Image (cartoon, grey):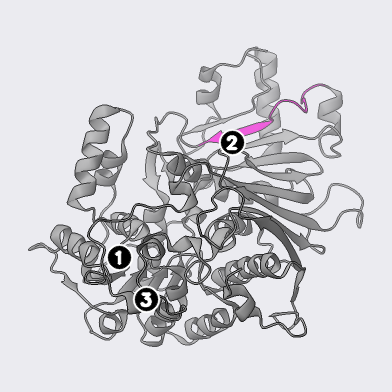
Amino acid sequence: MKFTRRDALKGLGGIPLMGAVWWAGAASTVAKKKERSAILEQLNIQPSLPAAVPGIGGDPIRVGIIGFGIRGEQLCRALGFATNEWKEEMRLAAEENPNNSTLADFEAQDKLNVHLAGICDIFDYRANKALNSFNTPDNKMERFRTYQEMIRSGKVDAVVIATPDHWHAPMTIDALENNIHVYVEKPMTHNVEETYRLREAARNSKATLQVGHQHRQTLSFQTAKDIIQKGTIGHVSLIQTNTNRNDDNGAWMYDIHPDASPQTIDWDMFLGSAPKVPFNKNHFFRWRKWWAYGSGLSGDLLSHDYDRLNCVLNMGIPDSVMTSGGIYTHRDGRNVPDVLQVNMEYPNFSTGSSQEEGKEQGMTFVYSATLGNGFNRPTILMGHDGTLELGNQLTIWPDRQSTRYADNIENEKMSPGVPIYQYDPGASTPDGVASATSQYFADKGLMWTYINGARVDSTFLHMREWLSCARNGGKVSCGVKEGFEEAISSHMAGLSYKLGRRIEWDKETEQLKPIEGIDFDEALLAPM
């Protein structure tokens, strides 16, 4: 069978998007092209752009940044503000690799109507780094020593929270209670109890909350919704999604800055509600390795994969969760696992069926993670009629025993070993990926998407949506409902790992089913 890049790039006539859509089983003959067109017409899958949002008019929205570490810097770039150091680093990277378009993409990014008004970071070096780059005649910016000072200053309309996990909820709740708009990184909360308090604060606030699951803006995920809703792959009974990393950065062994000391870091503020321990650089820079500050694989990475699928399937909180794993690849003093296996059960969930009524119902969501091997295991949704592989691209294979496609398979118009549909929104766009960790996020569709042939930072789209809703009203794609579902599901996985038993959810009461003698939050945050 001959299949050329030219076939792929021709795609479907009339689709208002750049990128490639094709039926990979089509040979280059007139008859086969007619078959391809007929199959694609039958599938009727529409590649979908993120929803348009109203412009951000009026006076600039005054935004404060709380936390200017790795993610804080990335979120500032999504707002249109890059440090001098990063711009120089990316300029040199582009000189070395012409396919590295990171700086060009940033410079081509649409400008948001934002005034970056304040920075709050407890490490002097990071706060000064932000001020040195962003405090200009065109953008007057100041440093706030505490988040409370920033929220109550009257100088910010909105805050971006990119701190360790144990600070997400306290800062978000405080901002919402003062009607300050919030963009908070995932997981939305660090324990079960504060998940309810944050939900209540969001419901009672006039401010807009967006949780940082930026993949909700990615074309392939938007398109996957259409695929599921049209029953293209039939009843989905199993989802498999994975974390595959094998480098120190991917295992949260971040660099320790030489300027770090008790004199340059407000250690008491870092600890907050965490157990009081002496100053520790390892804890400060590599906080994701401890339950006291972070949420491990369940909150840091499972939360991404859960929400990636929840935005496609809208499956909600599982009825039950079972988790296993351990510290098997980085025995360096951490107490969160670096290998994890999570089974989430949805016994009453259905995506629709092509078979007789009542035969199919229920789904298992499997998350499998290791920080000791980088072999790429894709995300797959396994349905009776087909299998969907989902990332920045998507591919559908028909199933040999499909009811929906039985005639096409019997007539050899489809082959179980050949995709019937593939969508690559960036087919003609070269990508330069700087690291294994960046490649991991890119493969999952978590870094960028493509609009009319141009690569666009999906975080930019997510923040633009948030700011537009803050200014104009409307509903964000990942608000408190979606954040609540992500947080509770992640906490169920963490609790199951800690307790070594099944954790169950009561949909009627919206509570975890109690276990005699167990305080869930004490168990979740306790060191192993």
In the rendered image, which residue does mark 1 sit on? Answer: 56
In the image, residue 369 lies at what x, y percent? 62, 49
> Which quarter of the figure has residue 8?
top right
Quadrant of the rendered structure where residue 501 is?
bottom right
Q: Earlier in the sequence, mark 1 or mark 3?
A: 1
- Residue placed at 75% from the left, 82% from the top? 514
State the extent of the magenta-drawn residues as a range: 412-424
| Label 2 crowd bin: few (<14), some (14–19), many (20+), radius 10 Å | few
In the rendered structure, find residue 375 and report the number of the disc placed on it.
Answer: 2
The image shows residue 518, relative to residue 255, as above or below, that is below
User: Which quadrant is home to the C terminus?
Assistant: bottom right
Residue found at the very far left of the displayed protein: 137
Q: Amino acid at mark 2?
A: Phe
Q: Nearer the viewer, residue 146 or 175?
A: 146
Q: Which mark is residue 227?
A: none
Type of the residue with mark 3: His
Q: Is residue 343 above or below residue 509?
A: above
Q: Is residue 53 visible?
A: no
Q: What residue is rendered at 86% in x and 39% in y?
A: 403
* Residue 363 falls within the magenta-colored stretch: no
On-image quarter of the N terminus: top right
Q: Is residue 433 above or below residue 501?
A: above
Give the camera-side residue of 246 and 151.
246
Q: Position of residue 414 (x, y in %)?
A: 76, 26
* Residue 136, horizontal then vertical, whole percent: 10, 62
Return the residue at label 3: 181
Task: Confirm whether residue 265 shows in the render.
Answer: yes
User: Relative to residue 432, is residue 367 drawn left or right?
Assistant: right
| Vertical comparison of 421 with 170: above or below | above
